[in-house]
Amino acid sequence: MPPMTTRWTALVPAGIFSLAAGTTLVFCGCTTPSSLRLEQPRLSEPQCRLDLISEQVWWTESGGVHRVLVEIPLPGAGTGRPTYLLYLRVTIAPDSQGEPETPADLRGFLIQTRGPQAGLTLLTRGNVSGPPSAGTGDWSLRVDLPFEDGSRLAGNLLAVHDDWRLTRFETRSHTADVQALLTEPAPIMNQHR
């Protein structure tokens, strides 16, 4: 009998792997990437409207403040070196039973990490909807965020709980940006459920 060879074929986007013997494995639990539209009216086509996805979205909570970090790679990629960084601090006001209800304060910024438009722009006001999950689960939220430079980022985020990534961002890689954000007056908040 000839030796059996193993041949693997990977279809990564679909999360399906098949073996030469005909066995198919389907990985369950794959998350849908977050999808966003970035509108930058000051730029020309094709950069004025970018449809972006990211699988690099994290959140944590401490002291009543929910913090979200989104690393957005180049258009068309779900992971990789970030071209944009979105950082949000959301304080959620409890309802009469003490359950999270609506955002009472929202602060944040968007950083373009490279290219001729590289730099930081502050959030001017915003909409965040979708209550945070209880405990340390995923948080599904919808955002509509206009920034000082006239750009707007809107879409759906699926954030995974991760204290370490947020702490590293706030205390190591972007300490000055986060501290400056905390000294700015709070932007105007549009509340939606």
Image (tube, rainbow, N blue to C red):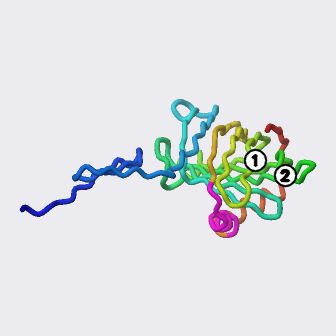
Is 169 magenta? The answer is yes
Q: Position of residue 78 (x, y in %)?
A: 49, 48
Magenta highlight: main SS:
helix
For label 2, the SS is: loop
The image quarter containing residue 153 is top right
Which residue is denoted by mark 2 in the rendering? 99
Q: Furthest residue to the front?
A: 1
Residue 175 inside the magenta-drawn segment? no
Q: Which residues are magenta?
A: 160-171
Residue at position x 62%, y 34% in the image:
39
Image quarter of the N terminus = bottom left
Q: Which residue appears at 64% of the width and 63% of the height?
A: 162
Q: Quadrant of the C terminus?
A: top right
**Residue 159 in picture, x, y percent from top left:** 63, 52
Residue at numbered disc 1? 131
Res 134 quadrant in image:
bottom right
- Does the residue at mark 1 contact the one at mark 2 (Cβ under 8 Å)? yes
**Which of the pair 7/144 is nearer the observer?**
7
Q: Residue at x 82, y 47 (%)?
A: 103
The disc at residue 51 is none
Q: Residue at x 7, y 61 (%)?
A: 2
- Residue 58 vertical placement versus 129 (above, below): below
Examine the rendered structure and indicate whether residue 60 appears above or below residue 10.
below
Mark 2, Cα crowd under 10 Å, few <14 / some 14-19 / many 20+, is: few
